[in-house]
Image (cartoon, coloured by chain):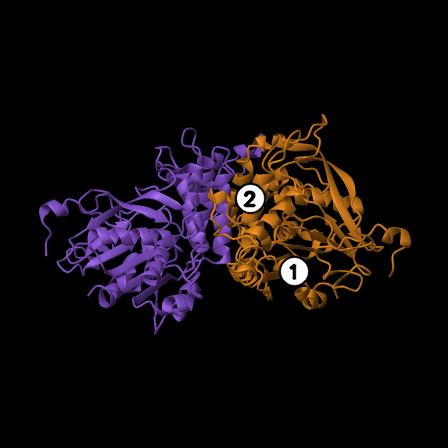
Chain colours: A orange, B purple
């Protein structure tokens, strides 16, 4: 069923909706929350074809290309004729609360018009999910046919199923477990510190001055290493020097030695993120991800999920060393019934949930999107 | 054979020897190099019982307790009656070139009496080994019965065997491979950047002002995570809060939330290192470790080791995710003859080369220290 041309033209176009004041799980409130979102396809008459796709830590709402030129980050999965067929399903993606891609976040104006900065409160994934539920209300979606996400997006999907059991028919959780582990918290702490220790950060009130680019860049480097497997880094870069740079070049100070290729690569990853992401959002969302624990305040993981009526579809990347497949297996065991963990076969590591997501297409068609 | 009382009293006591000017592998020179070292036991008449034990990145020369009260970092392995029996063997440990435990490093005075700081040159593990060879000369040691080391100490041991094949009878390399991999370089880069980006670092010329404690502390946190296994961190800390601290405490700014136990633990690791280690040495030695490649300039690893006449003893920690056992296996394959990799069984990760070194005792007695 093709959508009218006017609506098609809005496929993959960022819009914003106000969802009101939000009391926060950890205390405090945000007086006015806006959520940015994109949609693809058309909601059917009984609103039974809606699909929510949740982005990861530094992701955005542009899941699929839609009417514009910009590629989407899950293009192999979402679009006309794709496993999540936007000719059949109405796909929604919302920017997470605290983010910097349109939803209310630390760079947003407070009621007096100044950026929140250091005064932006601690938010959790559940807070975002509660805001997203209001977005669903606004869109006339009582129950999602499916909520999907990878990495932190998977945590958001899982929280949907636990918080609103009657609003999620299928829940697809890729490359994340039921809670952030000690190691994931530890790596997150290092990233947050990298930003906080940048003198330009000024406790988060930097919007009128230079940005904490060095700190955000370092945070990204630490994160990016964890997103890739040891084998991937070895295969791509080995011990080679970058171009004509020589890591052994005689230097007056060690600072002027040439770089290894892998250093140059990580410099590039850092630069790219610094050019597109707000450091405060990185801190806020990283701390939200540290808070990820679907069992928190619900008597543990198993009890939290015992009332979830969604059909779960779990997947992991076999080379992931940040969100180990074992953590997806542990989540599967905590779920009602027999839930298999589909394995994405990729050498790349965690980022396989982006680069190799197409591998899940056939199984998703079979089990979730017939 | 008991050593005279006067010599016994020097067991495990730090001494220093000048070894002259040193031309450096990457260019440049150090005009006057001193090496700090400790010894245990007594060199025998034909100097055939000398053993060199090499410390790791932030380690020191205090391998064994000796005559003082301070425990040694390989006490289970080294001492009277231990596998490396100091009643039979003369054990030497030298502080690495560029370090901060007595050997010439960036905090040492230059010929004009000012700390080297930013002007300290790029040094490699080979540079240190060449300086250590002069120490051996001074001590009257032509050939080591054995050179041992774990982690960066293992890299130093391996370089001894490749650089001075006729001076090493047994070479014991624990928990490191033939070269630093792309991932190890990447993690090292993040650590070096953490220090360089600390405004107190001032390119390394901070000795007359505040120390770059925050940067060094962050470097240590990043490193320490890599020294421990995911399972170890999960088992010890899980998602628990630290004492009465609550990671979900309502806060004016996110900065004031309580810490997770694992954050507090890493804070403690950072503080401990900051209290005992020089940031410039951390940078210099980390970059030296990045340079680790026994095959560099020698036609590759296999050719580099083809002329090594030492008997090799390799070991790895089965849960090590920084220096994977596979890298020790790869080194074994590059060595002449059949060299097994002895596996230390430990859940802790890389640091098992310290905490569980006693596991190697029986095999070391059998093969290296009869």
Across and down, in percent, residue A147 comes to: 69, 54
Q: Nearer the viewer, residue B156 or B339?
A: B156
Q: Secondary structure at mark 2?
A: helix
Whether residue A305 sits left or right of residue A8 in the image: it is left
Compared with residue A317, is residue A6 higher up or lower down, i.e. above or below?
A: above
Across and down, in percent, residue B60 comes to: 31, 46
Which residue extends farthest right?
A5
**Residue at 60% from the left image edge and 39% from the top image edge:** A213
Could you say which disc has been placed on residue B113 in the image?
Answer: none
Q: Residues within 10 Å of mark 2 (few under 14, many from 20)?
A: many
Across and down, in percent, residue B350 comes to: 39, 55
Quarter holding residue A233: bottom right
Q: Is residue B115 visible?
A: yes
Q: Which residue is mark 2?
A: A218
Q: Which residue is mark 1?
A: A355
Across and down, in percent, residue B58 comes to: 37, 46
**Residue at 86% from the left image edge and 61% from the top image edge:** A1
| Position of the C terminus of chain B by quadrant | bottom left
Q: Chain of mark 2?
A: A
Q: Residues within 10 Å of mark 1 (few under 14, many from 20)?
A: some
Q: Chain of mark 1?
A: A
> What distance separates the C-alpha of mark 1 from that of mark 2?
23 Å
Callouts 1 and 2 in the same chain: yes
**Residue at 44% from the left image edge and 66% from the top image edge:** B299
């Amino acid at each position: 069923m093709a959508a009218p041309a006017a609506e098609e033209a809005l496929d993959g176009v960022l819009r914003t909706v106000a969802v009101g004041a939000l009391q926060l799980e950890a205390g405090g409130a945000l007086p006015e929350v806006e959520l940015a979102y994109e949609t693809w396809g058309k909601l059917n008459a009984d609103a039974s074809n809606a699909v929510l796709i949740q982005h990861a830590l530094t992701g955005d709402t542009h899941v699929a290309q839609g009417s514009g030129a910009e590629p989407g980050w899950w293009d192999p999965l979402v679009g006309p004729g794709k496993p999540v067929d936007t000719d059949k399903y109405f796909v929604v993606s919302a920017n997470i609360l605290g983010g910097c891609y349109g939803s209310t976040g630390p760079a947003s104006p407070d009621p007096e018009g100044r950026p929140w900065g250091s005064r932006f409160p601690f938010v959790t994934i559940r807070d975002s999910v509660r805001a997203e539920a209001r977005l669903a209300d606004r869109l006339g979606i009582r129950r999602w046919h499916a909520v999907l996400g990878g990495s932190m997006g998977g945590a958001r999907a899982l929280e949907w199923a636990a918080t609103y059991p009657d609003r999620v028919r299928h829940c697809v959780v890729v490359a994340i477990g039921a809670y952030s582990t000690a190691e994931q918290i530890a790596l997150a702490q290092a990233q947050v510190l990298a930003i906080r220790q940048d003198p330009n950060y000024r406790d988060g009130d930097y919007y009128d001055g230079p940005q904490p680019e060095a700190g955000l860049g370092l945070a990204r480097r630490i994160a990016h290493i964890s997103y890739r497997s040891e084998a991937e880094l070895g295969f791509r870069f080995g011990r080679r020097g970058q171009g004509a740079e020589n890591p052994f070049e005689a230097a007056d100070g060690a600072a002027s030695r040439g770089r290894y290729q892998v250093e140059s690569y990580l410099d590039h990853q850092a630069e790219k993120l610094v050019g597109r992401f707000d450091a405060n959002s990185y801190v806020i969302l990283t701390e939200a991800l540290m808070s990820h624990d679907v069992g928190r305040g619900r008597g543990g993981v198993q009890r939290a999920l015992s009332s979830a009526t969604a059909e779960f579809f779990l997947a992991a990347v076999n080379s992931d060393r940040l969100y180990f497949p074992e953590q997806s297996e542990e989540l599967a065991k905590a779920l009602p019934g027999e839930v298999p963990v589909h394995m994405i076969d990729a050498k790349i590591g965690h980022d396989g949930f982006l680069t190799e997501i197409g591998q899940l297409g056939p199984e998703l068609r079979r089990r979730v999107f017939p």
